[in-house]
Amino acid sequence: MKTEKAEIYSALANLYDTLMQDVDYEMWADFIDEVIQTHHPNPVDVLELACGTGAISLYLAKLDEYILTATDQSAAMIEKARQKAAEQEADVQFHTMDFTDIHCDKKFDIIFSVFDSVNYLHNETDILKMLLGCQDILNPGGLLIFDFSTPQNSLEAVDYLNNEEGSFGPYRYFRESRYEPEQQFHFNEFDIDELADDGKTVIRSFNEVHKQRIYSLNEMLSILEQTSYHQVAKYEGFDLVDADDNSTRVTMVLRCQKQQ
């Protein structure tokens, strides 16, 4: 049977929540809420970029009276997010959008993106597109919050991510993970089978290759210096502690400097 090459987060959308079942989304949402409340006095309109199946925004909807919009490039992921929102009766608006081509009529007090989505931007040019696109739709004084994965994280994570396998409903998957430090890329390749009702016969097979550029803190700070954002903070992990070169995940907090 021929294996279909799939766009990232298309076939995987059906398995994404299973893959991420060990992620403490509630803690993550609490952290983002803490960052927002620490650095912005009265935020109302909040936008999430690269939201996946919407877990963080759905938790945030329970924490504060934000008006929440969440977007992702993958239509399949957005469909899953809308299903979850309907089941939870959560007031979050989900839309399909590429965060290197931001288009929105609305302005926001907060824009955030988590779980190293920015690492899917493979060069400085694309990161600057994202940064400037956010600037265009941020209210003056608004915050852009995003995290990214560092080389230290890839070195630690590759061992437990490699050769991972699992299943959910009619799907099973196998993941190969590798980090190439010379090229600064981390690859996660998924082989996904859709099974018949007997749980054995393969109906279709998919292959998705996820390629992330791994940035050091200094590299990211150098890119940010080319913008007019004011750097409010750089946090390590899920604490309001200053990040350094040894941090595995860094959360940047930037303030929009543009005038009315």
Image (spheres, helix red, strand yellow):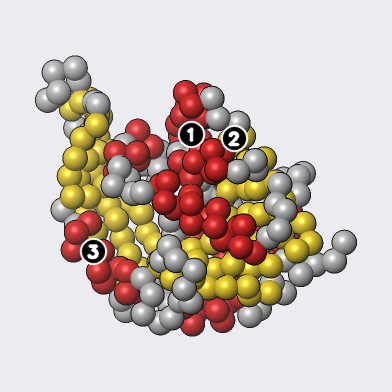
The correct choice, above or below, for 214 with respect to 98 in the image is: below
Q: Residue at x 19, y 59 (%)?
A: 160
Going by the image, does 66 lie left or right of 118? right
Disc 3 versus disc 1: distance between alpha carbons? 28 Å
Nearer to the camera, 41 or 222: 41
Going by the image, does 15 lie left or right of 28? left
What quarter of the picture does the N terminus occupy? top left
Going by the image, does 166 lie left or right of 208? left
Q: Are marks 2 and 1 in contact (CB under 8 Å)?
A: yes
Amino acid found under the numbered disc labelled 2? Val
Residue 216 seen by the camera: yes
Label 1 neighbourhood size at 10 Å, few (<14), some (14-19), many (20+)?
many
Q: Which mark is residue 59?
A: none
Q: Which mark is residue 92?
A: 2
Quarter of the figure with residue 228:
bottom right
Disc 2 versus disc 1: distance between alpha carbons? 9 Å
Q: Earlier in the sequence, mark 2 or mark 1?
A: 1
Q: Position of residue 242 (x, y in %)?
A: 48, 77
Quarter of the figure with residue 91:
top right
Q: Earlier in the sequence, mark 3 or mark 1?
A: 1
Q: Residue at x 36, y 71 (%)?
A: 248
Nearer to the camera, 81 or 2: 81
Q: Nearer the viewer, mark 3 or mark 2?
A: 2
Residue receiving disc 3:
158
Amino acid found under the numbered disc labelled 1? Ala
Q: Earlier in the sequence, mark 3 or mark 2?
A: 2
